[in-house]
Image (spheres, grey):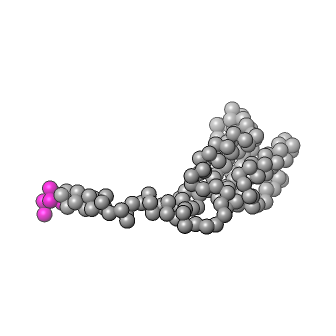
Amino acid sequence: MKISELRQIIREEIQKLKEDKSTDLWNQYYKNVENDKKPRIFDINDVKDNVEKIKKEIKAPYVGAQYSDLGGAHNVDIYIVVSLDDKKDWHNNILENSKYFRMSLSNEGKLELFSGSHLLRPYKFRKTKVKSVDEAIKKINAYIQLASKGE
């Protein structure tokens, strides 16, 4: 079989896939959101606004936040990284050399600290359930105040 014949077959198959709406990945991805009836504190449609809100309202010298929808549009999580030190004070400009912590906030309301500096170990943060993004921000700010007092 010649290469030109293979290219033609590939073009035809691609055209069939484009015309077949059942293979539209975007629609399959978002169909789960409409069928999901569990209570969520945010979803794929407003997660970007919530990420910006978190970055703006957490009171720390460095705050980073981003979202992940690897589990599908119905399983969106926000990942938050906070440093209690200014970026200029990080040794070798490495976040992990500062007093930092990383948290995840699931759209089901689970807030969990999963990584942090050894300097923050005396200040425990228990996994908790929140009912809104605002409540999560309050709990994170309370933890920051607690950890900042020990400096």
Q: What stretch is highlighted in magenta?
A: 1-6
Magenta stretch: includes residue 4: yes
Quadrant where the C terminus is found in the figure = top right
Secondary structure that dominates the magenta span: helix
Q: Is residue 143 above or below residue 112?
A: above
- Can see residue 149? yes
The residue positioned farthest toward the top in the image shown: 88
Report if residue 91 lies within the magenta region.
no
- As rendered, which of 92 and 35 lies closer to the eye? 35
Q: Position of residue 100 (x, y in %)?
A: 72, 46
Residue, x 64% and y 42% (percent of image)? 52
Question: Could you say where residue 107 lies in the image, as x and y percent from the top left?
Answer: 64, 58
**Relative depth, front residue between 145 and 43:** 43
* Left or right placement of residue 5 versus residue 118 in this view: left
Residue 91: image quadrant is top right
Residue drawn at the location 60% of the way across and 56% of the way down:
43
Q: Residue 76 or 113: which is nearer the viewer?
A: 76
Q: Residue sitting at 37 percent across and 65 percent down? A: 22
